[in-house]
Structures are given as C-alpha cells and as structure tokens.
C-alpha cells in the first residue's frame, strides 16, 4: 500500500492538492450503525479552518464536507465512506513566481527530485490543506470512540515559542483562538504574535493531546505498538519534528525508581508512561506531545536556488500562518482518534473470548 | 497485517519469547544477488548481545544466528529469508515468583488484560530479547544500503542520565562499552554506573542515529513520510518514549528565519531539518534522537498488585541492564536501516522514468 | 486494510453506492510523468456504460469521470489520483418495494446479516455500478502498461449461454454490441437475446481476457503469484463464479506430456500454461477465462423471504441486463490491467541489479 | 507486503526451499487461549506428506513440526507463532544435472529471469514442499474454526484424469490413499495409476473442498470478497489452473431462473452459489473446486533449452508424484481454513453492535 493511506482495519486514504479541484478521502472499515452527518465533521473542520482568527492564514474557504457514500438514512452502513471538499478559494496566481524556485524549508526540492516534477501551486500535495480530510475522518473516529467507549480526545497548544502554559484548564482551550489552556498567558500570546507578524517571521510550537477513557489492551506487539503507531500518525502531520509519549525526553534523566508508575488495586499512582506500557494501552489517559517547526513561509528574505541550479532569493508573500502549531490542534486530535480507532478494531479482530465470543477488553 | 511485521516492500516479521525455544524472523522482499553470510549479521548481534560488559545484563547467550533459507551459494535469491537464534540460557526459574505479579512499568498488566493470559517468563514477547532479530534483519538492510548507495548508519549514546556528550567523535563510538562519542566523559560514565548499580536503580538515556549518503527522494506523502515511518520504527523499540528528527523539540522556540535550511547550488547551508523535507529525504544526513526510559527492572522495592487484585511488593532480582539505552544503539541503527531499505524499494516501485525505465533517484 | 482496496504498490480504493450521490476512487502509486486526461478513461467507461445497446440495462448515465487530483499540466505527478463520477439517473423509487425483501441470488440477505442494515436502493454497494471506477482506474494502468512495455489487454465474450465463439478475431470484438470475436454467430446471439428478453429470464456467459507483451518475471512467490492475484481480481467482479488460467479445467484430463509447454531458443512451442509458470509471467500471452452467472434480477417470479422472516414472492422489475457477461468485458480488462500494473511495480521494487541499479526484467 | 504472506488479520508468512536447511512459517494474529500442540498439526502434515503411498513421491521425511513461540502452557498467547520443519532427506545430488536447464512446465525459467539467479535444487522456493507450512498453519485455523463456530472443512479428489467421482461419501475420503469419495472407482484409479507410472507420465486432477457451519457475513466488499480471497488462496497452490465457486463454469449455460437459489424462512432451496452471495458467506456450505495440472516432472523426454540458450533434452528422474492432485487435498483444506479464519477476524474487527459491543454475526 502506498503512502496515502493510514490504518489497517480503519483505513483512511486521502487525495488532493492545495490548489486542485477538490480534496477528499475514503474511510474503509467504519463499523455500521454509527449516526453520521456532515455536521459531525464540520465542527472540527471549522476549528482547523484558516481565516478564523487574525493569527492564522487569511485564506478563506468554507471547507464544507460532503458525504458521498457509506451513509444511508443517517447511519453508516459498513461500506466505504467517501468524503469531499471542493477547493473554492485557490488564487493560483499567488504562486506562479515560485514555479521554478525551491523554497528553503519546503518540500519543493524533495518533491521535484522524487518525482521529476511537481504541482508547485501552494505546495500541491505537501500543503497542510490535505489535513482537512484527516480532521474529517478523525471526527468519525472520535464520534465512535466516544459513543461506544466514552473515549474523549482533547489537544491544546502547550507552548508557543517562549510562552509555555503553566496550568492546563481544559475548559479554557475552546475559549481562545490559540487553543491555549492557560488564560493568564493570553495577553502575552497576543502581543507576541503581533510582534511576530510585524517582523514577517514565524515561530514553533508544542501541541499536547490527551485521550481519556481508552480501554486497556489496545496496541500490538512488537512493531505496531500503540505508541509506535501514535508516533507514526503524529510525526506524519506537516511540520512536526518530535513526538513524545508521557514524560518523553524527560526520561533521559530519570531513574527507574522515579519513572515507573506504581500500581495498587486502586489504580496507578502516577502516569509517567503516558498511558502505554509495553506498547499497549494501560487504561490511564494517553498523553502525547509534538514539536511543530516554525513555517518556512515567511516574508524574511532567504537564499535558495531554482530548478536551473542558480542562486535565487526567496520571499514568501501569499497567505500564511505565523504559527502552524495553532491549527495543528484539531489535526493532532484527529490523528490520535484515527490510531485509537484502528487499534480498537484490530484488537477486536483477534481478542475474543474463545468460549463466549465476547471481546477481551476493558477487564478492569 | 498484525503487529509483528514492519515494512511494505522490505518486510520483517519476527517471532519468539524471551524464554521460549527460539526467536526468529522472516525477511521478505530482499533483492537478489546480495552476498550474505551469518557473519554479516553477527557483528551487530554481538554489539547488542547482553553480557559483553559490566554495564549490561549478565545473561550470556552466544546469539548465533542461522540462515535457514533465501540464500544460495552465498547470495540472496530474492525469496524469503528465514533467520533463527536458539535460546540457550533461559533460567526460567528466575521468573516464577512473578507469575501472578504485575511489575510496575512493565507490560505484565497490559498483556494480561489484552490477551487474558501471558507468558510471564522474562517478559515473554515484550522482552528486549526480540530485538536481536531486528538487529539481524537490520544488518541485511545496512549491507545493501551501503553496497548499492554508500549509505552509512551510525548510532551512539548521546546522553546517559545527567551526562551528555559535548562532542561527537564517530571514531570513539566503538572504542568504549557505552557507544559514547565523547571520550572525555568516559570516566564520569563509569563512576556514575558504578554508583547506580550499587543503588539497585536504573537510568534513562538518549540515543542518536545518523544516516549519511541517503539518496534524495525517499518517503511517501502523506502518511508514510520518511520521518513518520522512522518515528514508528524507533518508537517501537522497547523503552523509547520520544523521537526527534533534526532539531526536534528545539524547534518549539525557533523562528522560521532560524530554522529553515537555506540552499544554494553548493548545497544546504545547515541541517535543522535532519535530512527530511515534506516527509522526503533531502540528501542531507538523516538525524534522529530517541529518549529511552530507565528500565523498571530494579531492585528498589515498589508497590504493585497481583493478578488476584491484591497489594504486592515488587523487587526485581534476575539479570538486568541498569541502562537499556546502551544496548539500544545497534537496535536504533537496525530500525533506521530497515525503514530506509523499505522506502528505497517503495520509491523504486513507483519512480522509474516513463521513457527510459531507469529509476528517478539521486538526481543531484 | 479493509476490502475496498486492491493492490500493494498500485493501489485502487473505491467508494460509492448504486443510488448514492456519487461513486469514486483513489489511485495511489501511479508513476509520475504519465500523460493523463479524462478522455483516456472515458472510452472504456463508455464501453462498460449501460444503455448503449438493447442488450444491456436501460439505465442511462453519461458516467463522466472527473480527475480531482494527482494530475498537473496534463501529467500524473506521482501523488494520489482522485476520480469522481456523479450519479445522475438514480430512480430510487424503483427499489422501494424491495426494501424489506431478500431477493434470491442477490447480496440483500448477506449484507443485511453482515452489517445489520443495508442501503437497499439498487443493491447499494453490491451493485455493478461500482465497477465503473475499476474501469476508470484500469484505463490508467492500461495506458501505462502500453506506453512503457507495449502491453496490450483485450477481453471478449467467448460464450453466451449455449453459443460459443469458434474463432477469435480480435478485430471483430469492437464491431458488435456483444464484444463477440466470431462474426458468424452474431445473428444467433441476436435471436437468442430477443427470446431471452421476451421470457424475462437471464443467461450466463464466459469472458476471456488476453494480455500480450507482458515482461517475463511478474508475480511473487508464494501466495501472491501472478495467477493467484489475477484470480483474486477476476473473482472479485460481480457475478463471477469461476476463473481459469490457460487451459484451466481442461488440465484435469491432460497428461504431463501433453500439458507442458516445450521450449526452445526460438521460444515456447505452445501456451497451455496461459503465460504463467510457477506464479510468474513467462513472457507468453497471459490468458484467463471467467464464468459469469446469469443475473438474478429477472421478471420470472421466485420464492423468497423478507426481513420479517415471512415468505414473499419476488419479481424484479427495474432495468437490468439479461446477460451481465457482456458489460463485464471492459471490467475484466481493467482488473487484469490493475493486477499487472501492481505486479510490475512490485517487481521493480525488489529486482534491481545490485551493481547497476537497473531493473532485472524483460531479459528475453 | 511482499508475496510470502497471506491474510490481513490472520497472517501466515512462510520461508524455505525444497533443499535448504529448513522450512518454516510465522502465524500472526491467532487469538489467545486456543489449546495447541504439535499433534494438532501433525495429522494434516502426515496426510500431505510424501512417501505415504505408492501413488506419491518416494521422498521420505518425517515432516515433524516444532512450535517455537506463541504457545505457553499449552495455549496460544496471542503473540506470533513460529513453526519449523527441518529438511532431512534432501538428496541434492538428484538435481545437479538440471542446474543450467529450464525444465518445461516448471518455474526454472521464470525464476531465473525474475531474479537473475535461482536455487535450482528441487525447484527451490517453487517446490510444493513449501506447502507443508500452509498445512501446518491451516491446521491452527481449522482447529479454531471448529472449536468456536463448529466449522468443518473437508476436501477430496473429485476427479483424476478421466475418472470422476459419481457419488460423494465423506466417510470414504480418509479410507483410501486417493482421498476419493466414491469407493466404486477405487479399482479403476489403482489400475489407471499403475499404467501411468509405467508410462512415466503424469495426470491432472480436480479437487473439491467444502466448508460447513460457516457463519453468515464473512467477506468484504468489494475487492476482498470471500470468493475472491478463496480464489486467491486456491490459485496460489502449486499447479492449480482453475478455481470454481459453487456451480463454477456450469453457470455459463444456466438461466437466472435455474441458477438463483430460492429462499424461504426454512432456508435456501438449493446451493448453486456455493455458499457465497455478493462476496459474503450466506451460511450455506461453501463449495469450491480446483483444477490441478499434471506435473511436468515426468520421465517422458521433452525439448527445452538451457541457461546458455542452447537446445537441451529434459528427462526428470528424481522422485515425483504422478498426480499432484492427490496430495493437494489437505493443502486445499488448509488454504480455505486460512481464508475463513482471516475473514472471521476481519469481520469481527468491524462488525460489533454499536450499543452492546457484541459481534454482528450468525444472526440466523
């Protein structure tokens, strides 16, 4: 299977370029009987959508998703679900000047070398626009996980450049345009971003994502561990350069006696592991963090070269996010949801009680 | 496909428990015509093997790999390669006392909940013993990559607890039992480990892995990006809690003008990206870092519970590494090699010049 | 991967129901640089399209395919290709009377039991309408195979009920509405079909498909042999109940000395094998035959039961083909093309000369 | 995934050549809790084993399978199961004369062209010896299917050359060395085979396989239909040239009113479909037939060519079956079992009742 699919039993395959006719995806393996309408996906699409605040790109598209198949009389039928979003605000002209240019920090050069050609308009397939379909597919997974197992998945911006959240108030996240969980830092964020836009530069960010209510037992030894598949899914988001589970890189300087989460009949005493032991969910909240690089689409000039092998100066005009980490929040939720959904189905495939044919799961 | 396989065109499938009869693997998709003997794998197996220094577990097994198929008259034939290592030093009695115990920080609890039962001897399938087969398979990939493309892959211990390498001298790595690239720190490491063993505790570590000579163009948009698949492979190593590509989590506080790697006809001016742009190799060295948690197999007592749901105290006796990061060095190399090999074959599948049927690759 | 995808390196995933909004597919893994327009697919879509002759269903839809992604400035880019056909002539009212009915010989009962519900309109996902997307994807494969390797794929109706072709004239196939290669039988066919329509019944058929110019070496031991994957692809066409390669069931009564195809430096002396030896293409024409059952959508009354478990009489009115074998001709070509394309790419992935990095293929 | 694996949730991967060190396989995805010993596999291995009667090859090997992993205290643990059979009676000298020869009807030529080299000893990977591992893996599937769902799978030789069974008495099958269900034909078979051996020739055969007790609902639209995957698995057996489901090629001359299986609340009135409707099991017995070509390893001389491109005469001495169809009987059972097992697990993955989390299956 080539690279535009993710999952084994809950499989999402996407297509579409930034400035093509449309973007879309197929969800294969969704259980039947799930109530599903476009509205279930639209909320998360709107959270990801550009143009919703002054901190994100000014590209404005309604991003209205249409269900083309797999849903009948309001419920999923078990057959493949086709989803489509037409591209409406394409402005291809913005990009004609970079036709032969390899913008530093972008995929221009690598796509050109890999394929011998590329759709240069807006980054083509490498554009973050493609992630809209992940958000749509993730919304289906989120709905199922919540309905059947009570799983809740929430991401937030835990750090933007030098400004880190000191407290995590989940109620705050949807109250501000940064998806930031610490209300005391909102003014600093606002000021920081204003300065940043003025300078024409961009900034990195850290996004955290938490899933609660995950049943014990999800994840397959030895390569498709739950943490390995989460790392695959999250590192596959545009601009991500690092993934942590639980304490992540802090473990480098931890001792075993500090790190291990003691257990008692009442449960775990801590969650350094981030909800995964031996690659399998433990029933504790699953916690992951990702590092988002600063976008390279900035108006600060930079040296590069063109397809003819000549030196060229690059200034990105167009419409761009000064911090792509903000809009990555719903994408991180979607990717975690897709992985959990896939592993839930994978677990069910194998783990039924031999005698009773009921699932071995959540034996707590 | 269930979880014991990795790769799509170069596929490695493993089996075996810590204290079973044998461990083994099948490599499917290896090109024909590669000269291969057991000796090609033995070097890396010996580097991973326990009992080679006083800093690692005292379990002693020769770990002699046998090629059972797929090689004829000294060359691979293109058919599946069967590899086998017999388990010789199993000492199952060491583990009988933990039959009903859920050791904190281990996979005991999650395996029991997932499957309703488990092979408790030495961690069974969750034991790091399984990684010997990854090292063997990785050696095949390393050999091919080097022979055909000149790719070299080297890992090293970049940090052990509080002690970080300040310089990276690749020649140093194989000169010491820590795979440490900074000779000035060897005394401190030695002293630190002696204290640690005395205390019966363990410590985390950071391992870095670098591949040079990688052709431009490896990696598939959008889910199976090269960095996503590297993250999957590295996070799938036992005890890994974090993966970074290039600058990793440092990007959180970088500006776009700092982070982006400027290009000129002479090449890239820097390598913050770690050799991957838009999920595709750029031709620069690929750089990844992983965080290894401290092993939970320590002789410091800890509270836990047993299968009957009662409180129980756990002290791990047995033979264990105080820092599992050390032996992870050859494993990290192997996993990166497997991913690069798989992506090389995947790239070739799709990217042949339509007119000349020669590969589109390494167009530099 | 769930069941709506076929292929490993050239992957086609489809969605869509007979009476839904649209049908579509994603092609993942198509090489870059292939000139491609909608017109390349439209010819085969028109051949498959209903309503083109009095021998096929009267449902009339233009079946106009749109390329939504993966093609830029007239050439494939190597990224996933999204294709879409809107459903225009749906007439859902025709089917309301069978909402609770399990039509004999149809998938009504099995879908209902599998999923606990179903889209009953026109057979939903089990309708042959879905095969339009296979034909579109197959046209892409056909084009590439022809352009790069000179492979030609032609199917024809070799038998319709009692009337079998006695000669095979490839030039005849596109000259008549039956895709029949023996012009001397056209009057009989015409008369037979007229009688059949009058009786309200349907008839089975045999379709043959031949690929010439296939390079030696396609097919993977041991499960994904070329013949095994062809069998999978052809048996997966609606209404197919049998697949033969080469002499097929005639081999049951052949002796080894008759069956084996003798070779000489001038080539093979015969082709009983149908172009495949040991699961790998031999360079001879690949020959396959399929048995198509008579459609169960007939106006002859038949006993059945309904969802309430009561006896019910079924008479299918609607618009239906009296012989689904006719329109299966372009579908069989498409499926063979998809399999050959996939195996060509799979072969390339693994089989490059170790020293020269040129493909091992077509060594004739 | 390369070609040495079959299945998606119950995955069997094999390795090994006819005259290598050993053959083996890994079963990934087997549910935990299944009682399993070597004896469970040995019965079917003995049925497949050569040297058991005068009608099969005289090669004598005990074919003793060893379980290397995945079973603990007599039960499967849910982890990957490693199986191994050492090759003991290899007699490589028998084959040295064909080192440079392309035997007609064999895979010698195609392997050589595909890979640029081959293990010529006994056919290497293309030898039927590899099917021993399929039989072992199939025995695990058969055991589970029977224990959990009461599924029984029986194959038999339905025709050998001109001699076809006229009655099918399942009790007869294991009573004779032909696996033949019609006792009245045993003398004719015996005489026919005696003549055949004398002539040094071989003969084709037809094998039939029936599964009863299969739950309704197995099979995935649209490409991985149950019949498509059965066709893939059966066509992948060495020497198979045709696969039929239910009435197979007889449907070509059937009318819809004859073919369709009428239903009533009491069940189906007939089973022309062979237990599969729309690619999904109907709950009726699944019936498949395969055509086995006569082996090309005969002592009748035949013209061929060698690797130097020169004319050469071929006479196969060695030890060979005059009718490979006989020993294919347990292989056909094994392959059907593997497919049903895989589809059972795939079905379970997706089809759980949304509200109660119990499987949607067997709603009869």
Image (tube, coloured by chain):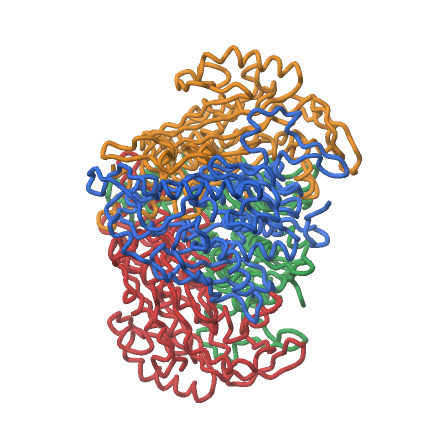
Chain colours: A blue, B orange, C red, D green
Question: Can you name the residue that lies furthest to the bottom here?
Answer: C198
Q: Residue at x 43, y 57 (%)?
A: C6
* Picture quadrant where residue A61 is located: bottom left
Residue A241 appears left or right of D341: left
Question: Which is nearer the eye, B266 or B28?
Answer: B266
Question: Which is nearer the eye, D56 or B269?
Answer: B269
Residue A6 appears left or right of D112: right
Q: Is residue D19 above or below residue D250?
A: above
Residue A27 spot, x, y in % from top left = 50, 58
Residue B1 spot, x, y in % from top left = 52, 47
Q: Residue at x 63, y 78 (%)?
A: C306
Question: Which is nearer the eye, A28 or C214?
Answer: A28
- From the image, which quarter does the C terminus of chain A lie in? top right
Residue A255 spot, x, y in % from top left = 62, 24
> Does residue A260 show up?
yes
Question: Which is nearer the eye, C313 or D235?
Answer: C313
Q: Is residue D362 above or below residue D323?
A: below
Number of dots carrying numbers:
0
> Does residue A229 show up?
no
* Picture quadrant where residue C38 is located: bottom left
Residue B294 spot, x, y in % from top left = 60, 26
């Amino acid at each position: 299977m080539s690279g535009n699919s993710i999952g084994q039993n809950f499989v999402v395959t996407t297509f579409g370029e930034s400035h093509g006719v449309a973007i879309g995806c197929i969800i294969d393996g969704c259980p039947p009987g799930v109530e599903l309408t476009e509205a279930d996906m639209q909320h998360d699409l709107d959270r990801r959508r550009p143009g919703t605040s002054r901190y994100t790109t000014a590209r404005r598209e309604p991003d209205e998703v249409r269900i083309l198949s797999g849903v009948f009389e309001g419920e999923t039928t078990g057959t493949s679900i086709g989803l489509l979003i037409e591209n409406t605000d394409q402005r291809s002209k913005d990009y004609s000047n970079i036709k032969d240019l390899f913008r530093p920090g972008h995929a221009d050069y690598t796509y050109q070398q890999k394929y011998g050609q590329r759709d240069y308009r807006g980054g083509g397939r490498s554009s973050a626009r493609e992630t809209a379909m992940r958000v749509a597919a993730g919304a289906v997974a989120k709905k199922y996980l919540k309905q059947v197992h009570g799983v809740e998945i929430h991401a937030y911006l835990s750090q933007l450049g030098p400004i880190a959240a000191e407290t995590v108030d989940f109620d705050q996240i949807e109250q501000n345009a940064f998806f930031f969980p610490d209300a005391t830092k909102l003014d600093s964020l606002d000021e920081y971003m204003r300065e940043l836009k003025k300078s024409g530069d961009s900034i990195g960010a850290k996004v955290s994502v938490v899933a609660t209510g995950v049943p014990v037992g999800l994840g397959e030894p030895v390569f498709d561990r739950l943490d390995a598949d989460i790392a695959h899914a999250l590192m596959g988001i545009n601009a991500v350069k690092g993934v942590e589970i639980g304490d992540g890189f802090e473990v480098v300087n931890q001792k075993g006696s500090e790190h291990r989460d003691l257990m008692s009949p009442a449960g775990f005493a801590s969650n350094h592991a981030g909800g995964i032991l031996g690659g399998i969910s433990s029933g504790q909240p699953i916690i992951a963090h990702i590092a988002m690089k600063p976008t390279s689409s900035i108006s600060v000039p930079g040296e590069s070269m063109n397809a003819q092998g000549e030196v060229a100066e690059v200034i990105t005009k167009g419409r761009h996010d000064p911090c792509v980490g903000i809009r990555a929040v719903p994408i991180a939720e979607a990717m975690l949801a897709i992985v959990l959904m896939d592993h839930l189905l994978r677990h069910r495939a194998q783990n039924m009680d031999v005698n009773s044919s009921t699932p071995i799961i959540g034996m707590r």
